[in-house]
Structures are given as structure tokens and as C-alpha cells.
Image (tube, rainbow, N blue to C red):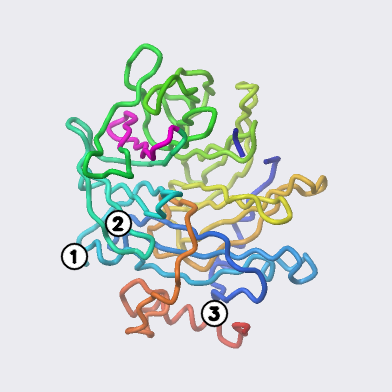
Amino acid sequence: MMKHLTNGIARTALIAAVATATLVNSLAQEPRYGLYIGDRDTYRVITYLQPTYDPSAGGGEDLALMLRWSCAYSQFAKGYQSDPLEQVYIYGIAVDPRSGWIWASDHLRNRIVAFKPNGNYVGDFALPAGATLPRKMTISNLFGSTYLYVSASGKLWVFGPLEDLNNASWEPFVDENNQQVSSESGVRVTEAGVLISNSGGKAALYKWSFNHRSGERGREWNVAGEDIDYIDNDTILLAVPGNPGTIKRLKLNDTTDITDFITGLPGRWQGIAVGPEETDRTRFIYIATYETFPNALIVYRYNPNDEEEPLRWFGAASPLPFKSGYAVAIGPVWNCSQCDDSCREDVNRDGVVDDADLLRILFAFGSSCGN
């Protein structure tokens, strides 16, 4: 099955102001998941952010209290990068729901890499012969074992089983004619099949055939994008690049129903991830923007029970490191006590003490951080 939706307009003019707010600890609800955001053009590899949602906070009207941010850590996978001046392009992130391992595509080095839930680097795995420049990825365990689906060289590849890395191997994902499926970027796995943001110039759904590495092209939409996700059993979100960018709404049961869902997004590219259902049956849509200043994680809440305003802009997280945001994934809550406090002057934890740290303090001056 798929995961809810309607129409809305991004209030991008407020991003710069909201994004500079301090990260504060939640006073009520416990965090249910974390956000893992890929870096590009820098050495940080992965940035971690932790949202906590309390629908009753502030009487259910104060957005800043209802969605709180804590544990911003922009050196989550620091151990992977031996040379701090060497660029790392993380174009895809996926989290194994069974082991909690975080997988990422190292675009420039033509390989995928794995990290344990605590951020420790596990190892790297080269792409198969003929495949280069890995992009988006996703994980599935629908067929008993766990497999990683990776877009590389314009094709879709399958790596696994992840439970037995000593014997894991690469296989092409093929269609009903036994031809390898085209996949330029975004990919998501559902019980219905594999969603691809750009397969031959169109977004497409490949319905499962008989195993984890084959599918039949059952749906296609006359639009292509950079990233893709879903929010209910009939609604798909497609991030279409541009400056500004757009999130398109696609309908599974009517491939001609293509509408602008969120418009005016900053940055050249946008990564998108839909959070799990909250206690009040709402879902959060997280949009990471690339090459904006300040970089921000834009958040929308979708509430299927709110007939007047089902889609609501919920602001933006504190600024992400510059040129991050090409990929975003939902994952387990990380133990934030593991953060390295050896350099507390590095407020945003990007490995450098600079004017960005000073701005954090200045914009937060006089505010309260809660209990």
C-alpha cells in the first residue's frame, strides 16, 4: 500500500527568518524518528536533525511549540572522511529498518557506503561494472531479505542481501521484457512496486513481478522529477527541480491528474521525505533544499481531517550547512549524547568556528531554550 494530501503554497519569504531560530529541546513528546540529510560540495557527509511533534503544545496554534527541533549534528558520519578538504557528494540516503544502518551513495567515488546507527563508518561497496555516479536510493525487505535499490548511470540496480554482506551482490532491476529499467534519480519502494521519479523521461511505477529484482511498468505520468515519495494509497509527491522548484501531486489511479502541490521552493534541487503518521493522524513532509542561503529544511504538515487547511506550512528547521540538502531520509532516533563537545564554540557543528556560529548566537540572543 502507499502512504495523504491536498493543495498548498510555500511561504518561502519567511524561510530566512524562521530558519535562524535556535534548536530547542522538546518539553513534552519524545522524538519518534530522525532526519538524515546528505551533504554536497563539503566534507560533512551526513547532517542529522531530530523533530518532535506535540499537537497540543501552544493550544494547538503555536507552530514553533508544536514542532520542535533538537540534536542538530552536522558531523554525524565524520569518521568516513579522512581528508577534511576532500569533497563528498552524498546524493542518496536510505536507512535499513531492521538493523538501523544508514546507507549513502558516494557520487564522486562510484560507490555506496554504510554507517552503523551511532554514525560509525562500516565500509564501502563499489558499484557493478559499467555503473557510475550513484544517486538516490531506497531499501526494501518485502521479499524476506533486505535489498538496496540504487539509481546509477541512468539505470536501477539492486544490492543485497544486506543481512549477508559477505555474499551480497549487484543485480539489474529488469522489466517484463527482461530489460534493465531506466532510473535517473529518485526511487521509492512500496508494497505495490517501485516508484521512479524519472524513468525514460517520465515518473513511473513498476509493479512487482515474481521477485525483488523485476517489475512490470504498470503506471507512468507525463512528468519527471528529481525525487519521489508517497503519502497515501493514491497520492505520490514528485520533486521537480528548478529555481524555484515545485512539488507535483500525482494520482495513482488517474495518471492524467498531475497538479502543482507546493510551489516556489528555493534552491536548484529539492530532496523530499514523508514522515510516518503522527498521533493525530497527520504527516509531515520534509523538503531539503540545495544551494540556498541559508539552507533550510522546509516542513509542511498534512492533516486529512482538516477540511479548511489540510496542508499547512510549518516553517523551517534551523539552517543546514551550506550546500547540503540534496537527499533526505527518515531514520531512527539517534542518541544525541554521542555528540562530540570538544569544540563547543562550533555551535552548528560543521567542523569550523566561523561567522555562521556567531550568527546562530546573535539571532537567538535573548531567547529561552526551555527546560
- Decide if residue 53 is on the left or right side of residue 103: right
- The answer to whether mark 3 and mark 2 are in CB contact below 8 A is no
Q: Looking at the image, is mark 2 or mark 1 nearer the viewer?
A: 1
Q: What element carries label 1?
A: loop
Dot 1 crowding, Cα within 10 Å, few <14, some 14–19, many 20+: few
Q: In which quarter of the image is the C terminus?
A: bottom right
Residue bearing the label numbered 3: 363
Q: Which residue lies furthest to the right in this view?
A: 308
The label on residue 348 is none
* Magenta stretch, main secondary structure class: strand
Residue 41 numbered tag:
2
Which of marks 2 and 3 precedes in the sequence?
2
Measuring 50% from the left and 38% from the top, which residue is drawn there?
228
> Of the residues tagged 1 and 3, which is closer to the observer?
1
Question: Label 3: few (<14), some or many (≥20) within 10 Å?
Answer: few
Segment tinted magenta in the rendering: 143-159
Q: Residue at x 54, y 23 (%)?
A: 221
Instruction: Give residue 66's position: percent from left, percent from top.
Output: 69, 66
